[in-house]
Amino acid sequence: MLNKIKVTPLASESFGVRSMCTFVETPDVRMLLDAGISLCPNRFGLPPHPIEFQTIARLRKRIAEAADKTEVVTISHYHFDHHTPSFEDWLVNWTEKDETARQIYEGKRVLLKNPREKINPSQRQRAWMFQRTGGRHAKTLENADAKEFKFGKETVLRFSEPVTHGPDNAMLGWVIMAEVECGGGRFVFAPDVQGPISNRTLELIKAAKPDVAMVGGPPFYLGGFKVDETQLQQGLDNLMVLAKTVPITILEHHALRGEAWYERTREAYESAHNAGNIVETAAEYAGEENVFLESRRKQLYEENPPSRDFERWMRWSSDKANKGKPPL
């Protein structure tokens, strides 16, 4: 369907981590979208299980290998599951000081969210830090908000205006979506739009007329205390609109962080089916099985109790834990 565009999801919730990292190839260019990956440090009162650490270690290698083949790396916003920091952290981001970020950004053309405009205070600080650490390794750092970049004979990479990280006026700030066009095919990458909840974001995705869209879905697991149920319903309603109009919707990220994710999104699947379209996870799109780990953390501890060495490691303060890999 995408003809000359090859989309390869590398890491996401359906692979067992927090991420939307995706490798995109055309005859003209190879690009790595949102090269970040994280684990939730505390879910159900529990730290990540050893299986989660094993998974993030494996997927970190997958991202690094893709970076070796990449000319362009994009950053939609500055959360650590969407870009790689330069500090040492084995608890959440699985990063070695300086080295992990260098492997990804060295010599690359980095197209990134404007670090000064349409950005909230915490992301502004992280953007400032990135420019002075991991970003120093890049060939170039270029603001991409609402811009278009051409590669070779027929590849165009377009970025949206900044859209909200969820609802309009969301405290979490703004992100930029990406659209890759080549050979008549279009792929849209819409991270952390949470549905999308925003009607403006929905209209921008529809206007691109994608053949395939990867979308960060509604954060149902935050319903009732961080996100209002009416906003979640709006996100689901807009997801259903996309499912009716986009041939393939890759549903990912926040939507998959609860065990009841499929029940909560069933209507979108039905909408797609009735229109002759497909909704699937990134793992399914890649031809792999879904591996949901964070939402099953309680079961992981019950079914696979960690070693005493691991338990001792987790009893350290988070600061100490970040200075040494867990015993796996």
Image (spheres, rainbow, N blue to C red):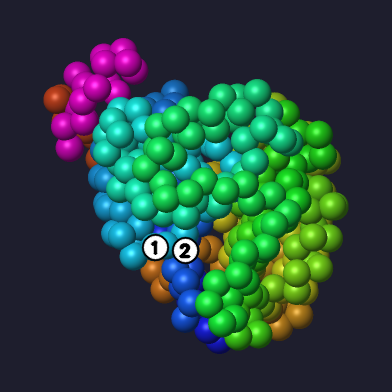
Within 10 Å of the Cα at label 2, are there few (<14), some (14-19), or many (20+) other Cα atoms? Answer: many
The residue that appears at 64% across and 41% down in the rendered structure is: 114
Residue 298 visible in this rendered orientation of the protein: no
317 inside magenta stretch: yes
Left or right of residue 275, residue 290 in this image: left
Q: Which residue is mark 1?
A: 70
Q: Which mark is residue 215?
A: none
Type of amino acid under label 2: Met
30 or 193: nearer the viewer: 30
Type of amino acid under label 1: Thr
| Cβ atoms under marks 2 and 1 closer than 8 Å | yes
The residue that appears at 53% across and 63% down in the rendered structure is: 281
Up/down of 217 relative to 282, above or below: above
Up/down of 8 relative to 256, above or below: below
Furthest residue in direction top, as rendered: 317
- Give the Cα distance between marks 2 and 1: 5 Å
Q: Which residues are magenta?
A: 310-328
Residue 27 visible in this rendered orientation of the protein: yes
The residue that appears at 34% across and 61% down in the rendered structure is: 66
Residue 257, position in %: x, y?
Answer: 54, 44
Q: Which residue is mark 2?
A: 31
232 inside magenta stretch: no
Within 10 Å of the Cα at label 1, are there few (<14), some (14-19), or many (20+) other Cα atoms? Answer: many
243 or 325: nearer the viewer: 325
| The quarter of the displayed image where residue 98 is located | top left
Q: Secondary structure at mark 1?
A: loop
Furthest residue in direction front, as rendered: 139
Q: Secondary structure at mark 2?
A: strand
180 or 133: nearer the viewer: 133
Locate the N terminus by quadrant: bottom right
Left or right of residue 233, residue 16 in this image: left
